[in-house]
Image: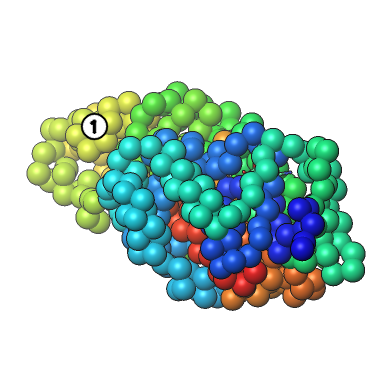
Amino acid sequence: MPSPNSFDAIVLGAGGAGLMCALIAGQRGRRVLVIDHAEAPGKKILISGGGRCNFTNLGAGPANYLSANPHFIKSALGRYTPADFIAMVDTHGIAWHEKTLGQLFCDGSAKQIVAMLLDECARGGVTIHCGDAIRAVDHADGRFTVAWGGGQASAPKLVIATGGPSIPKIGATGFAYELAKRFGLALVEPRPALVPLTLGPDEALFRGLSGVAAKVLARAGKTAFREAALFTHRGLSGPAILQISSYWRHGESIGIDFLPDQPTGWLRDAKRARPTAGARSVLGALLPDRLAEVLAERLALAGELANLPDKVLEAAERRLADWRFFPSGTEGFAKAEVTVGGIATDGLSSQTMEARALPGLYAIGEAIDVTGWLGGYNFQWAWASGWACGQAL
Ligand code: FDA
């Protein structure tokens, strides 16, 4: 008879990845304990997708993720697909819809996703303990011992599922990295991702556009996203910017094409067609007024098109198609939806998420160096990595 504090596996973190891992292992007959310091499980799920949880993306594939080793993702993503998660959602009678670009949201509330995961955990006999700080995690004689508040438990298997440090005010920490380092796992430098970018004082003109949005094409290196960008009082945000922020590094520029639908030579052609039109009003017909005004000012586009030489118009067109911003930074982990980097995947099995350096130790979800685009990809990784690990416990 095992002691009540003895489990087959202990999962640290009751987020998407930890709960999925626990429910799979529990339903496979394993005795599983999940421990979380937050007072309730699934807090990030509850605030996700504006409270409706963008729980997966129909098109989720390896190309939608950043990782130092892009091949690592393939096995888990291939074995647990968006269709598998949708099947679970459907079994629980949760209504959902596709919002845009393959992004699936609950019709009702993210609470339904948490309730579903907890229900599946209950079916697997999983024990969940929330609300106490973890005091110690030790490994000796082939067993991991975890102590919290006034309690303690041990198991031969330990899963790190405590996520990344984004949004500390709801309990996110870098605990996964501390544990990883202690147990000999390497880290890829963590940095905030899917995060607004800040602009310095030299861009005061643009910061004055707070609240203005435009559909743009945002580029960083070879990566580009065509979605909305939003000017904020601190800099740039909106889906296009959040996406590109994951690829941006300090000191680099990002390029914005403000008019991705305009063909080459469009400004010169406009001059031929409407020579008496004002340059500002031509821009204003294609972009929000305040933005057109600032861009025209920066480009010194004033007066009628007929009075502007073709060379000036061509140069303006080139800049509008690749406007360079040098962000001064990001809004940091306080505002980042996710973390790029984390526990290095080289030290983990892509099949089971088990650490090569220490058999019995596993890491899943956002804690490891796998980061998805905006649009349901991060939860799909949480489910897929949790599932792969749960199958192996
Ligand atoms: P997650 O962070 O969810 O869970 C980790 C758990 O560990 C937490 O419960 C935490 O309390 C616990 N923990 C942390 N430190 C601990 C410690 N020291 N001791 C004990 N427990 C500890 N993704 C997506 O695909 N679609 C979406 O709609 C959104 N929307 C979204 C909105 C916002 C505002 C944010 C911040 C993020 C998103 N995301 C998202 C990203 C998504 O939420 C994220 O990638 C997953 O929740 C990661 O799941 P994990 O289980 O790995 O970590």
Res. 310 visible in picture: no
Total count of labels: 1
Q: What residue sits 82% from the left and 48% below the top?
A: 152
Q: Which quadrant of the rendered structure holds the C terminus?
A: bottom right
- The residue at 49%/36% (across/down) is 47
Q: Secondary structure at mark 1?
A: helix
Q: Residue at x 52, y 38 (%)?
A: 196
Q: Position of residue 197 (x, y in %)?
A: 54, 39
Nearer to the camera, 153 or 60:
153
Q: Is mark 1 within 8 Å of ligand 1?
A: no
User: Looking at the rendering, in which quadrant would you find the N terminus?
Assistant: bottom right
Image x and y of residue 59, in percent: 35, 63
Q: Which residue is mark 1?
A: 284
Relative to 144, 273 lies left or right: left
Q: Amino acid at mark 1?
A: Gly
Q: Residues within 10 Å of mark 1 (few under 14, many from 20)?
A: some
Pinpoint residue 5: horizontal percent, then vertical percent: 78, 53
Q: Is residue 177 above or below residue 301?
A: below
Q: Is residue 354 visible?
A: yes
Q: Position of residue 90 (x, y in %)?
A: 32, 54
Question: Based on the displayed image, in which of its 4 quarters is residue 369 positioned?
Answer: bottom right
- What residue do we see at 35% from left, 64% from top? 83
